[in-house]
Image (cartoon, rainbow, N blue to C red):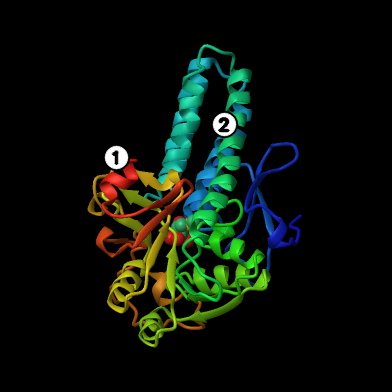
């Protein structure tokens, strides 16, 4: 039975009391309703990630880790070899749900490594190790976001007008968010920020999710269409841009929600500092540059039909619908991580 819940006091991803399912906030229903959903089946897990019921790079990493643990609990009658082989199969399946955010494969690899490093133990003991690993991934996510909040806040002044894109908020992580963490921390300290949320076409994560969570926290929030941010910057009404990211390449190129790179270009032109908030789980030293990042292409209906009462483009027209773009490192003022702010040249600062 679905229950209504308070976003401010609920983790975006958690385990149920019996650890038989992963509990998530259904992000397709916000802002109309905040409803919890219990998911215990592998295909439902795949579908939840694919349909953005759970979304945001860190949140899908934690969800996949909890998911693999929950699935492993049903496999205790297998031999050790069969258990590990089945675990890999399930991890590969979940990993194929969305390609761009590195956190998904990062969390699944971490879970598999924990199992493989202990393959001499009994299956029951390996399941317990998977449990601990998934909980560690969740706990680290919360700590990391707090760290990003502290380092991010050191770059902001009271009264700042901050522009953000998509949702890199608490809904995209377990708690606090990445791009919103400095905002929440500053809000607690009376910084009186004014936040502009890009609507974020086509799935409206800015208007539906970021605007919802910020207003729930009592933060001064304004929504604008994606094509309005340059005009706002031209009027001198933005002091800083804070965005999240789905994968940062070794040279500092950062993949994030489609439209982020346009924002960075405008920010550069108008001299507005542009910061990418990146938990270490989003840094991918194995990807050399942004052009090596696979960009997810999504259903044309998201552009032509979704949200409209009737279709808004001619039947049969071709649609270009990439979910992410890559912001060139030369447009990024600084990359805020949980251990500090990295500045150019990123190839060196990120490695450090
Ligand atoms: O397609 P989405 O909604 O999962 O895209 C999310 C983003 O682009 C976020 O900015 C990114 O994952 C960082 S979340 C802390």
The crowd level at tag 2 (other Cα within 10 Å; few <14, some 14-19, many 20+) is: many
Q: Secondary structure at mark 2?
A: helix
Residue on which the image places disc 2: 133
Q: In the rendering, at what x and y percent does residue 18 appear?
A: 74, 36
**Horizontal side, residue 111 vs residue 6: left or right:** left
Q: In the rendering, at what x and y percent does residue 68 appear?
A: 55, 35
**Residue at 72% over, 57% down:** 9
CA separation in Å, label 1 and label 2: 23 Å
Q: Nearer the viewer, residue 260 or 22?
A: 260
Residue on which the image places disc 1: 286
**Horizontal side, residue 48 vs residue 302: left or right:** right
Establish if 18 lies above or below 35.
Answer: above
Report the disc number at residue 37.
none
The crowd level at tag 1 (other Cα within 10 Å; few <14, some 14-19, many 20+) is: few
Q: Quadrant of the N terminus?
A: bottom right
Can residue 30 be seen here? no
Can residue 262 be seen here? yes
Q: Secondary structure at mark 1?
A: loop
Q: Quadrant of the C terminus?
A: top left
Total count of labels: 2
Earlier residue among tags 1 and 2: 2
Q: In the rendering, at what x and y percent does residue 324 appear?
A: 36, 61
Establish if 254 lies above or below 266.
Answer: above
């Amino acid at each position: 039975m679905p229950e209504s819940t308070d976003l401010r006091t609920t983790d975006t991803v958690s385990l149920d009391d019996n650890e038989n399912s992963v509990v998530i906030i259904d992000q397709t229903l916000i802002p109309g309703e905040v409803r919890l959903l219990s998911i215990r089946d592998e295909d439902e897990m795949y579908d939840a990630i694919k349909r953005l019921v759970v979304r945001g790079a860190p949140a899908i990493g934690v969800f996949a880790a909890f998911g693999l643990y929950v699935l492993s609990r049903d496999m205790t009658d297998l031999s050790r070899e069969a258990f590990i082989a089945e675990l890999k199969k399930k991890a590969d399946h979940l990993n194929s749900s969305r390609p761009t955010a590195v956190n998904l494969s990062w969390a699944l690899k971490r879970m598999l490594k924990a199992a493989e490093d202990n393959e001499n133990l009994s299956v029951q003991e390996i399941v317990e190790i998977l449990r601990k690993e998934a909980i560690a991934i969740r706990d680290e996510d919360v700590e990391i976001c707090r760290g990003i909040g502290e380092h991010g806040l050191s770059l902001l002044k009271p009264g700042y007008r901050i522009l953000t894109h998509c949702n890199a908020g608490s809904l995209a992580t377990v708690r606090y968010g990445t791009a919103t963490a400095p905002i929440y921390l500053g809000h607690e300290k009376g910084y009186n920020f004014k936040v502009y949320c890009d609507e974020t076409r086509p799935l409206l994560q800015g208007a539906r999710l970021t605007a919802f969570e910020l207003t729930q926290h009592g933060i001064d929030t304004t929504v604008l269409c994606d094509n309005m941010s340059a005009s706002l910057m031209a009027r001198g009404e933005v002091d800083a841009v804070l965005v999240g990211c789905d994968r940062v390449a070794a040279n500092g190129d950062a993949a994030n929600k489609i439209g982020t790179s346009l924002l960075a270009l405008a920010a550069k032109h108008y001299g507005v500092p542009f910061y990418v908030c990146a938990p270490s789980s989003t840094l991918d030293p194995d990807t050399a540059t942004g052009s090596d990042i696979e960009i997810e292409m999504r259903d044309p209906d998201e552009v032509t039909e979704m949200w409209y009462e009737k279709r808004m483009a001619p039947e049969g027209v071709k649609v270009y619908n990439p979910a992410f773009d890559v912001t060139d490192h030369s447009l990024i003022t600084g990359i805020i991580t949980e251990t500090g702010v990295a500045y150019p040249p990123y190839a060196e600062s990120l490695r450090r």
